[in-house]
Image (cartoon, grey):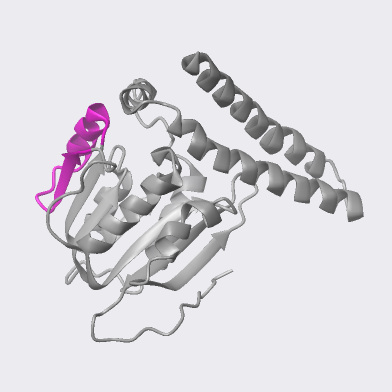
């Protein structure tokens, strides 16, 4: 049946990810060097990239109702992805703040309205308001329990949390800054990513920014629908080559109607 095949695909993907991250990484840590070491690293990159892209199509086989149930089950315990305690996640938070073209200012936040898609329990959402990134911050997720914890964490009038499926709708109004971090592969297909890119472009004010975060190098696939939008250009990009899981942070700017963009180029921090 389709259910059984979907479970088989997820199990195979999980096994490949485990082997690529544990087995091959351990091989490298044991001292392989030279041509053999580079061959192992190249194999690891290929396997990891294939697995990450496979996750996109794996989620595409799961019905939205089951997808929501899977995430609800994941949130049976607080902070299921260790956002509050992981050094890896804290490093990612710092880099997402550093890549912004406008510097945070508690007294005069540079962005009027900020949107975080897939806000989870609100760890980063609260930080956006607390550290002066935006005057009004909206966090969106489709798991009720996660949003309950987010509201408890951040009872700030400047922060708002919405229960919403972004494949169906987005919050009303326009935004100056949007964060889309590590969620695109859950949409299930490139066509859904392209649809989200189109709808987000209509929500971002001219001169505003979209920050994308995704696994590297698979993000070349996930981010391409955004990079192909003629009204967006890359203003900054950083590839974090973490041995645990490399990822890329890309900052895009929405074109000003009266301004003619040159072909986009990226500014790579590392």
Q: Identify the residue at image location x=60%, y=54%.
A: 217
Q: Toward the viewer: 120 or 175?
A: 175
Q: Is residue 148 above or below residue 76?
A: below
- Left or right relative to 171: residue 120: right
Q: Identify the residue at image location x=28%, y=51%.
A: 116
Q: Residue 269 placed where, x, y %?
A: 54, 71
Does any portion of residue 176 appear in the rendered image? no
Q: Identify the residue at image location x=48%, y=18%.
A: 2
Q: Residue 242 placed where, x, y %?
A: 61, 52
Residue 163 in magenta stretch: yes
Which quadrant of the rendered structure holds the C terminus? Answer: bottom right
Q: Toward the viewer: 261 or 36?
A: 261
Q: Which residues are magenta?
A: 142-164
Q: Residue 79 placed where, x, y %?
A: 37, 32
Residue 4 in magenta stretch: no
Q: Is residue 26 above or below residue 132?
A: above
The residue positioned farthest toward the left in the image shown: 157
Q: Toward the viewer: 15 or 201?
A: 201
- Left or right relative to 254: residue 158: left
Does any portion of residue 123 appear in the rendered image? yes
Q: Identify the residue at image location x=36%, y=20%.
A: 73
Q: Is residue 192 above or below residue 133?
A: above
């Amino acid at each position: 049946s389709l259910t059984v095949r979907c479970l088989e695909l997820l199990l195979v993907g999980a096994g490949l990810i485990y082997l690529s991250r544990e087995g091959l990484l351990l091989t490298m840590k044991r001292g392989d060097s030279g041509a053999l070491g580079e061959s192992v690293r190249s194999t690891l990159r290929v396997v990891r990239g294939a697995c990450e892209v496979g996750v996109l199509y794996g989620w595409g086989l799961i019905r939205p109702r089951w997808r929501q149930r899977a995430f609800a089950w994941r949130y049976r315990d607080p902070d299921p992805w260790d956002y509050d305690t992981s050094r890896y996640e804290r490093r990612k938070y710092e880099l997402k703040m550093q890549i912004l073209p406008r510097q945070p200012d508690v007294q005069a936040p540079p962005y009027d309205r900020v949107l975080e898609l897939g806000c989870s329990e609100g760890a980063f959402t609260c930080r956006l308001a607390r550290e002066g990134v935006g005057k009004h911050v909206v966090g969106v997720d489709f798991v009720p329990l996660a949003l309950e914890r987010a509201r408890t964490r951040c009872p700030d009038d400047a922060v708002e949390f919405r229960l919403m499926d972004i494949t169906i709708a987005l919050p009303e109004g326009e935004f100056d800054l949007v964060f889309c971090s590590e969620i695109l592969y859950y949409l299930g297909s490139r066509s859904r990513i392209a649809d989200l890119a189109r709808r987000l472009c209509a929500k971002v004010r001219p001169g505003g920014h979209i920050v994308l975060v995704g696994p590297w190098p698979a993000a070349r696939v996930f981010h391409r629908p955004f990079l192909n939008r003629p009204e967006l250009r890359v203003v900054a990009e950083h590839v974090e080559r973490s041995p645990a899981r490399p990822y890329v942070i890309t900052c895009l700017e929405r074109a000003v109607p009266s301004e003619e963009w040159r072909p986009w180029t990226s500014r790579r921090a590392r």
